[in-house]
Image: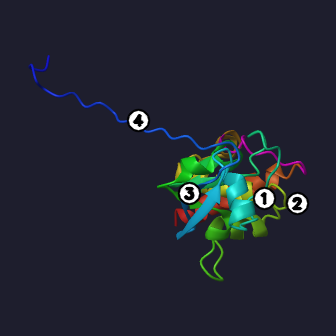
Amino acid sequence: MAGAGAAEATPVLRSFTVPAGASTEVALSVNGQRHVVAVEPRVTLLDALRERLRLTGTKKGCDRGECGACTVLVDGERIKSCLTLAVMAQDVEVTTIEGLARGEDLHPVQEAFIRHDAFQCGACTPGQIMSAVACINEGHAGSDAQIREWMSGNLCRCAAYQNIVAAVADAAHGSRR
């Protein structure tokens, strides 16, 4: 037990009130660039990316976190941006599909999706690619079964799953070289 007078660390919680319909400024770091946007506190990261920053590569699918079309990376970890408030994304690095390529050089996962025709209609593709990047980085691309399991939060209406699994395996194999 701490001695008398020892101060225990007490977390400081800050709260603020924003009147209904009012906006607050949010600083977002997206694809290596800092942006300050005014949003209502209820605005999702997905809507802030698409509607405020005009980064429309991230798709709005089900808007309930079920399909994975809105998957982005936050500090390298995949999240569903439709379930994340923009105000929650301050002080983190957000990577969208627009941030994967380096100039004209596509990310190895993007190249693998092209090689394996894993696009189909393309609505799910950005989320699939972002999730695939995380799946590989997390070390969950050791087998087709493992890839299927760790990509199961992303749905493809065109059922291009075999092509997607092949693309993820290909990119994972290439990234180990």
In depth, the one of 124 and 110 nearer the eye is 124
Q: Which mark is residue 125?
A: 1
Among the 4 quarters of the image, the one containing residue 118 = bottom right
Majority secondary structure of magenta residues: loop
- In percent of width and height, residue 1 lies at 14, 16
Classify mark 4: helix, strand or loop.
loop
Residue at image coords 68%, 64%: 97
Q: Which residue is denoted by mark 3 in the rendering?
A: 26
Residue 25's quadrant in the figure? bottom right
What residue is rendered at 77% in x and 51% in y?
Answer: 69
Q: CA distance from mark 4 to mark 3?
A: 18 Å
Give SS at disc 1: helix
Q: Give yes or no for residue 155 being in the magenta stretch.
A: yes
- For mark 3, give the secondary structure: strand
Instruction: State the residue position of label 2.
Output: 120
Mark 2 and mark 4 in contact (Cβ < 8 Å)?
no
Residue 40 highlighted magenta (yes or no): no
Dots 1, 4 in contact, CB < 8 A? no
